[in-house]
Image (tube, grey):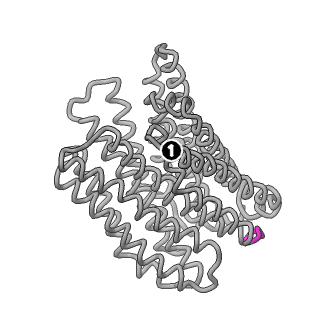
């Protein structure tokens, strides 16, 4: 296994531990006094670092590893400055936002992070096209880096409104959701689907099927933005496009799942039961996410859902944790990109249990808010779920810290 791959994945998992720690502190502050912590500033650090320090860093690492697998033996050496630039800007945001909020240092690091994404997009677009034995996976990755760059338009427009003090609630929210959409449903999703497609191709799924799924999702991606912004004054034509986009995504996912089920006996031999369960969890979470998106085309349901904070937080965490993070952990575990010691396995199990607990509690809190009824001790239970997330990732990182890779890898290879 490539040593640089292991190093960068370990750095990414340390970042996920810090993301979980920030979430735990915020949950603690909701219940107990913590005067040294500014909740709003910590929230900015938590979200920015989750995007850049954990998910983007992990995806960049895995996309570079894909080039390495395709015969580009110097891929990690060539991308080393870029990977360092991304992690430095991520940690810059982590250590400035909690203390300064939106001030020059934190804005500088967040802006530099965007320029790093441009750098990666340009370089990866070129290298993916030059990789030997190109296949449909290249299209997923190229779309991913383009959507990552596109998402920055929302961030820059938001910065302009704040700097000019011309922020209007509608424009502010539209900019935020624009950035989130093309991060969640563009960069994150298409990169993950590219990784998944590559493995499904190796398992025997026809390239024509993967291409069909790609076309359905790429056509749907731009109009699907309005699924998060149906409160904007859009015309009937755009509304019809939004409905079609929601259906295209469901069809695309259905096609891919049908192929995966058809080749299940082959796939089962390639991944362990442990990783297989994680992939099933990812598939269920993504199915729920796509169904919720499709349901949101009903304007009354959309306005009702977006009016309650626990539902918004629950949905964002469903995508960020239940879909993207679980997929990355499943992918890393399935192909033994880190040593799967007992501590690492139990840490991932505890972390996943924390995700499930967090989602169920947020759903219950959202339903209670809709009925204008308080849910007793819900914040304490959510603190417990946050503690599970942090403890799980602490176990994972501890297991990696005290493991001997070669011995663990050899043992896992024999399972």
Which residue is more in the foreground, 287 or 282? 287
Q: In this view, does 318 lie above or below 179?
A: above
Q: Is residue 97 visible?
A: yes
Could you tell me which residue is drawn at 55 percent across and 41 percent down? 350
Could you tell me which residue is drawn at 80 percent across and 64 percent down? 266
**Which residue is tagged 1?**
235
Q: Is residue 31 above or below residue 339?
A: above
Could you tell me which residue is drawn at 49 percent across and 58 percent down? 400
User: Is 297 one of the magenta-colored residues?
Assistant: no
Q: Can residue 347 be seen in this view?
A: no
Identify the image quadrant of the C terminus: bottom right
Crowd around label 1: few <14 · some 14–19 · many ≥20 (10 Å): few
Identify the image quadrant of the N terminus: bottom right
Q: In this view, does 357 lie above or below 283?
A: above
Could you tell me which residue is drawn at 50 percent across and 51 percent down? 396
User: Is 204 one of the magenta-colored residues?
Assistant: yes
Residue 169, given in percent of the width and then of the height, sits at: 31, 38
Report helix, strand or loop for mark 1. loop
Which residue is more in the foreground, 22 or 7? 22
Residue 286, given in percent of the width and then of the height, sits at: 62, 47
Q: In this view, does 88 lie above or below 184?
A: below
Residue interval drawn in magenta: 202-206
């Amino acid at each position: 296994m490539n040593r640089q791959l292991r190093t960068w994945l370990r750095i990414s998992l340390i970042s996920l531990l810090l993301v979980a720690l920030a979430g735990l502190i915020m949950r603690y502050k909701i219940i107990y006094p913590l005067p040294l912590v500014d909740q709003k500033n910590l929230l900015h650090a938590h979200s920015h670092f989750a995007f850049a320090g954990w998910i983007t860093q992990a995806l960049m690492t895995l996309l570079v590893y894909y080039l390495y697998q395709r015969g580009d033996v110097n891929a990690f050496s060539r991308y080393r400055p870029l990977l360092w630039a991304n992690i430095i800007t991520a940690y810059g945001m982590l250590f400035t936002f909690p203390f300064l909020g939106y001030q020059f240092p934190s804005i500088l690091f967040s802006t530099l992070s965007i320029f790093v994404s441009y750098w990666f997009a340009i370089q990866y677009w070129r290298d993916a096209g030059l990789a030997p034995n190109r296949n449909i996976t290249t299209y997923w990755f190229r779309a991913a880096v383009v959507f990552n760059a596109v998402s920055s338009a929302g961030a820059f427009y938001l910065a302009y409104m704040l700097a000019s003090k011309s922020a209007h609630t509608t424009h502010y929210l539209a900019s935020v959701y624009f950035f989130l959409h093309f991060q969640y449903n563009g960069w994150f999703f298409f990169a993950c689907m590219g990784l998944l497609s590559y493995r499904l191709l190796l398992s025997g799924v026809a390239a024509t099927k993967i291409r069909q799924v790609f076309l359905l999702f790429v056509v749907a991606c731009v109009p699907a933005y309005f699924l998060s912004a149906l409160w904007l004054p859009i015309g009937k034509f755009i509304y019809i496009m939004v409905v079609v986009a929601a259906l295209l995504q469901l069809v695309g996912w259905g096609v891919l799942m049908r192929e995966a089920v058809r080749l299940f006996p082959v796939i089962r031999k390639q991944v362990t039961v442990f990783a297989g369960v994680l992939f099933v969890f990812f598939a269920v979470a993504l199915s729920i996410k796509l169904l919720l998106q499709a349901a949101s085309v009903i304007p009354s349901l959309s306005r009702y859902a977006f009016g309650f904070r626990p539902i918004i937080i629950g949905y964002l965490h469903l995508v960020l944790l239940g879909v993207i993070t679980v997929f990355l952990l499943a992918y890393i575990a399935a192909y033994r990109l880190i040593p799967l010691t007992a501590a690492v396995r139990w840490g991932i199990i505890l972390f996943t249990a924390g995700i499930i607990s967090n989602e169920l509690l947020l759903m219950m809190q959202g339903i209670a808010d809709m009925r204008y009824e308080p849910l007793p001790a819900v914040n304490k239970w959510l603190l417990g779920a946050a503690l599970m997330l942090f403890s799980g990732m602490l176990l994972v990182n501890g297991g990696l810290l005290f493991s001997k890779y070669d011995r663990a890898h050899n043992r896992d290879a024999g399972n």
